Amino acid sequence: MQVGLGRLGLTPSHFWELTMPEFRMAITGYYDAHNAVQRQEWERTRWLAVRMLSPHVKKGSKLQPQDLGIFPWERPDKGRILTKDELRARIENRDGWLV
């Protein structure tokens, strides 16, 4: 209830009208949006650092944002394959809703 009324800003009546899968989707959407804002801020900060350091690099070389560091969301996904039991457990934990 704290998440629904606090973070999501739902009214009590709207909160109680939601089903559990709907509430779970609302939370997922909230955190996805929050993470997108955080990523943009980190990428902006890295870009500003590159712009500030650019006058100090050797002539002829160009500093790229990834030269300063690579964020976890920029790393390639290994693409791990789930076993049938792991997949079944994930589906059951989402009340039959695939996200």
Image (tube, helix red, strand yellow):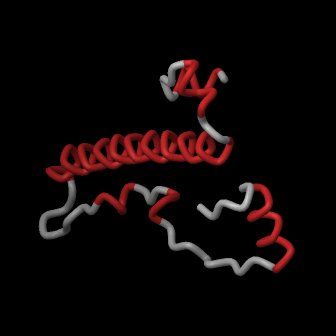
Q: Tell me residue 19's x, y (percent).
A: 65, 41
Which residue is found at the position 63% from the left and 27% from the top? 16
Instruction: Report the front residue among 83 and 24.
Output: 24
- Residue 54 vertical position relative to residue 37 in the rendered view, above or below: below
- For residue 67, what is the image quadrant? bottom left
At 78% across and 56% down in the image, what residue appears? Answer: 93
Task: Give the residue drawn at x 34%, y 46%.
Answer: 40
The answer to which of 34 and 85 lies nearer the viewer is 85
Up-down relation of residue 70 to residue 30 (above or below): below
Which quadrant of the structure image shows residue 12?
Answer: top right
25 and 12: which is toward the camera: 12
Quarter placement of the N terminus: top right
Horizontal and vertical percent position of residue 57: 21, 57
Residue at image x 59%, y 45%?
Answer: 22
70 left or right, relative to 77: left
Above/below status of 29 relative to 91: above
Picture quarter with the C terminus: bottom right
Quadrant of residue 17 in the image? top right
Task: Tell me residue 6's x, y (percent).
Answer: 55, 20
Give the mark count.
0
Residue that lies at the very extreme toward the right in this rendered image? 85
Q: Position of residue 58 (x, y in %)?
A: 19, 62
Relative to residue 86, is residue 56 depicted above or below?
above
Answer with left or right where residue 21 lies relative to residue 36. right
